[in-house]
Image: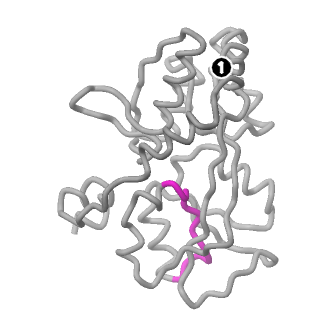
Amino acid sequence: ADQPPFLQYDSAQQDATGIYPDVLRELGKESGLTFQFLFVGSKEEALQKLATGEADILFNIYNSESANQIFYFSNAFSYQNFSFISNRHHRMTEQEPLVIALPENFPGTRAYITAQHPDWTILTKKHIWDCLTLVSEGKCDYALIPELYLLQSNILTLFPQLIQLPDHSVTIPISLSISRKQPVLLQSILNKSILHLKEDTLHSIIQKHTILPLRNLTLPNLLTHYPLQAAG
């Protein structure tokens, strides 16, 4: 599924665009590997294809001990900040048990946050819009939303009662997961390429996909980025 600005399907080119495909292409320049992109409808389908060997690599999985029994993992190639989104009058506290809404299309984030905060209740939703709706309706304390998504999206303008807390975020290391149907040599090749990935190259890729002209809130844009609320 599309996850702008991290991953999107370009139907015109029949190819993947976004931060993660561009990072993978940079790793290919160093390693000599080439990649084809397979789009699926859900996180569960993606993990299944990785387990069966129909797919070799999956973006954006936190390297947890339990998942390590199923997949190989590369070293972290980046770190992703998730911002706390709350109602304007909610007082921030991380000391008490919280109810957190989290988009499900970022595999491993739930495991990471649960390990750091075992007393928090995590509610996963398919769309970021659903997470924000839970907060606006008072059904959870916060939504954790990728900061890079918020940089290139107007979505909070559609929730005037919500705010992004400037001094609170969760930073999650991002690795590539590798099917165990592949030889462990692939893990070594990717790790070597990640080691040689220059910081300014990664920064340029992120800028390319997040520093965009302001979009008008047109119907096509709403249908593309916020499909559920546009359906009514």
- When the figure is inspected, residue 31 is found, relative to residue 93, above or below; the finding is above
Q: Is residue 149 above or below residue 54?
A: below
Left or right: where 177 falls relative to 135: right
Q: Seen from this angle, which residue lies furthest front?
A: 200
Task: Pick out the residue farthest to the left.
Answer: 219
The three-letter code of the residue at mark 1 reads Ser
Q: Position of residue 213 (x, y in %)?
A: 31, 57
Give 105 or 60, whichever is nearer the viewer: 60
Q: Give the quarter of the image for residue 208.
A: top left
Does residue 127 sit above or below 188 in this rendering? below
Looking at the rendered image, the quarter that the C terminus falls into is bottom left
Q: Residue at x 48, y 34 (%)?
A: 45
Q: Quadrant of the N terminus?
A: top left
* 146 inside magenta stretch: yes
Asked whether, in this view, residue 161 is left or right of residue 12, the answer is right
> x, y percentage for residue 67?
72, 34
Magenta segment, which residues? 138-148
Q: Which residue is mark 1?
A: 193
**Residue at horizontal 80 percent and vertical 57 percent from the top:** 116
Dividing the picture into quadrants, the one containing residue 92 is bottom right
Return the x and y of residue 189 as percentages of the image width and height.
Answer: 68, 13
| Disc 1, SS | helix
Q: Quadrant of residue 229?
A: bottom left
Towards the viewer: 177 or 147: 147
- Residue 139 in the image: state x and y as whole percent: 55, 78
Residue 76 inside the magenta-drawn segment: no
Say which residue appears at 54% left-offset and 61% top-offset.
Answer: 145
Residue at point 66%, 52% (across, down)? 110
Q: Residues within 10 Å of mark 1 (few under 14, many from 20)?
A: many
In the picture shown, does residue 62 fall above or below 14? below
